[in-house]
Image: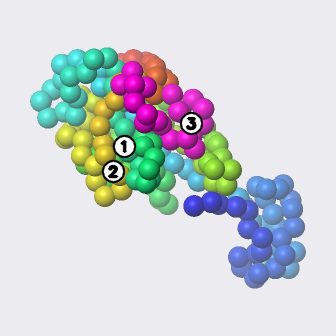
Amino acid sequence: MPNTPPDYCPDCGGRLEPVDPPAVQRCADCGEYEFFNPIPTARVAVLDSGGRSPPGSAAKPHDGDAVLLVKVDIPDRDLWGTPGGMVEAGEDPDVAGARELEEETTLVVDPADLVLFDARTFVKFEATHKTCLCYAVDAADVRGTPEADDEVAEARFWTPGELAATEDRLLTSWPEAYKDLQWWVDEGGAALDRDG
Ligand SMILES: [Zn+2]
């Protein structure tokens, strides 16, 4: 779903003139300003250190640090990503992250337990401008068992080593850092450590 700067005024259909392109244009006919901005998205890294966790939490024994990933439903390509999606109008980003996590994996988390650890703007497929906010949460603070819901094909924890041993990869449309599962483990884990 690409987003591109508008060619014509949405109000009157008039011609748009550059003010501060591509972010700001102005209609030559009615004078309305038109703004072009990235789409805000939120992603949640559920981190499982493999330690002992309370009953009912999403944590399971792992040989090292694991991250919950969902398999994107693309035919013939096994691409995985952290659960997440677009922030809706009137919704705070952490609430969006918790909502998307539940929609994709059935796991339930309190938005207050999500720790923001990265935010960056990038262009997906050279067409869609996005601003992604990355949150981390300890699997012990997440309730339920990960199950793929309607929007994804599979949901499971991966360690970086497990993923590297397969042909599966993280989303190719992501910024370079995001394509490395170890980055999610290191950066998300450091944020949880700082949060205490
Ligand atoms: Zn106009």
Q: CA distance from mark 2 to mark 3?
A: 26 Å
x then y, percent, for residue 87: 48, 53
Residue at the spot 78% in from the left edge and 70% down from the top edge: 7
Residue at the left extreme? Answer: 55
Residue 164 sits inside the magenta stretch: yes
Q: In this rendering, would 55 be left or right of 118? A: left
**Judging from the image, what secondary structure is the residue with disc 3 in?**
strand
Q: Residue 127: image x %, image y %?
A: 67, 55
Question: Label 1 belongs to which residue?
Answer: 70
Q: Quadrant of residue 46?
A: top left
The stretch of residues the image draws in magenta is 161-180
Tag 2 residue = 153
Residue 167 colored in magenta in the image: yes
Amino acid, disc 1: Val
> Which SS class for mark 1?
strand
Do residues under tags 1 and 3 come within 8 Å of each other at their CB atoms?
no
Q: Residue at x 31, y 32 (%)?
A: 157
Residue occupying the far bottom of the picture:
12
Amino acid tagged 3: Ala
The residue under label 3 is 119
Label located before the other in sequence (1 or 3)? 1
Note whether residue 44 is visible: no
* Above/below status of 67 relative to 50: below
Mark pair 1, 3: CA separation: 20 Å
